[in-house]
Amino acid sequence: MNNPRIRPALRRRPLLLAASALALLTPLTACGGSDTAAGDGKTLRLWHYEDKDGALGKAWDAAIAEFKKTHPDVKVVFERKTFEQIQQNAGMILNSDKAPDVMEYNKGNATTGLLAKQGLLTDLTPLVQDNGWDMKISEDASVTARYNADGEMGGEKWYGIPNYGEFVLTYYNDDLFKKHGVDKPTDFKSFEAALAKFKAAGVTPLANAGNDHPAGHWLYLLALSKANATWVDNYQLYLGKVDFHGPEMTYAVDKYQEWLDKGYFDKKDVGLKGNDMTEQFVAQKRPIMVGGNWWFGGLSTDITNFQWSTAPYPGSDDTLGSGGNHWVIPTKAKNKKLAEDFIAITMSNKIQKLIGEKGNIPLVAKPEDITNPKSRQLINAFAQSHKNGGLSFYPDWPVTGYYDTWVAATQNLMNGGKPDTVLDELAGPYEKYLATRP
């Protein structure tokens, strides 16, 4: 298997309520009562952390129902955890007799990779190959599910099964485009032309949030528009030197500053959070928003008074994104065969189609099978972005704690900081980390 870009990962996901290890052992939501028959092939213990009203939560509920139909003699003991519960305590729990049979887990070297290296996760490669999932899930989307003996992503062995994908794309307010006579962009030149026309009409075109990940996503997206695969691999994999004052990052900070000066971004957005950015779009204050597909479901619910659409960002072939989190089977799981059967159901056409219909991105469903037009548009955009290896992960993944650096640096730029100073700010922690690597 040829490895595409392999990038260290710290999943950028909104963290939910923290809880103690004791709370992790206490069921929050359960189906079927206490597990008194674990290990006899009659009980499946399952954990996940998806909200019950979200696309994935609904999909996993449907998968559980399907599992019960196909396994009528099996009791399902389901516990809904928080993301942080599992994130903070998984190593301890999976090394005990309290390990579930199957659970949703965070992708990355510091999470799935670490537990795999410690021998706490089952090698799922035979399951993947027997079901042909390695042929259905692209290598670009499966990187974070495969690990080597050192627990680094992109290895030959599968320790997780991803069901969905994630990426950053463009959201357009179609009504505002029509109102102001602005053509929908098809490339970067027409994108900037649209920004200029909106601004001339007195409309700030771009939604943004300086005190959260969106501003950093914008900066990295601009850098990706001038980067090649080698630069991305050097940045994420430490395969070669990264010059933060080179053409890629220099272009990004210069273009960002240019858009600030022209009023395409509002400097007052420097203190906003991601939810504030989406509210700008929902309230029709900004006609264009660039953000992750994780906003899609909420927008579908919240927007009732105007037409909107999605498309790949037209300024770059690469975008931020990856395969989603995945199912893992702990080494100490008592009913691994039942766990495998459940995972297979989540990969079935029925459940994959449901994921798509409810507003997420299924990895093995075809866009033409999705009847929801907006969801199909989203899935097509994801397919277009990743078909040629265009998922370049996230800018804060290479260095632990780097997320805060990116937030501070983009805020500095929005507050009038000099581009060279901002680049130095980004380079410092990265180069310090490289100097400490063996």
Image: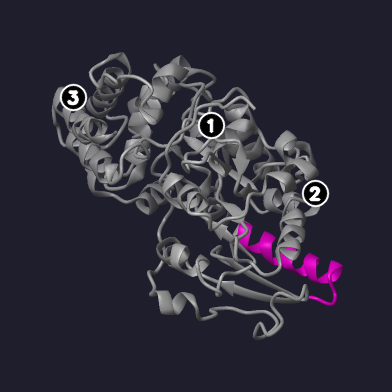
* Residue for badge 1: 178
Would residue 248 appear left or right of 60 to someone viewing this image? left
Residue type for callout 1: Lys
Question: Along the horizontal axis of the image, is 325 left or right of 376?
Answer: left
Is the Cβ of the residue at disc 3 closer than 8 Å to that at disc 2?
Answer: no
Residue 159 x/y as whole percent: 60, 48
Front position among marks 1 and 2: 2
Residue position marked by numbered label 2 in the rendering:
349
Helix, strand or loop under label 3: helix
Q: Nearer the viewer, mark 1 or mark 3?
A: 3
The residue closer to the viewer here, 233 or 410, is 233
* Residue 389: quarter of image: top right
Give the residue pinned by disc 3.
419
**Residue 48: image location, x then y, percent:** 57, 65
Disc 3 or 2, which lies upstream in sequence? Answer: 2
Q: Amino acid at mark 3?
A: Pro
Q: Residues within 10 Å of mark 3 (few under 14, many from 20)?
A: many
- Say whether residue 260 is left or right of residue 288: left
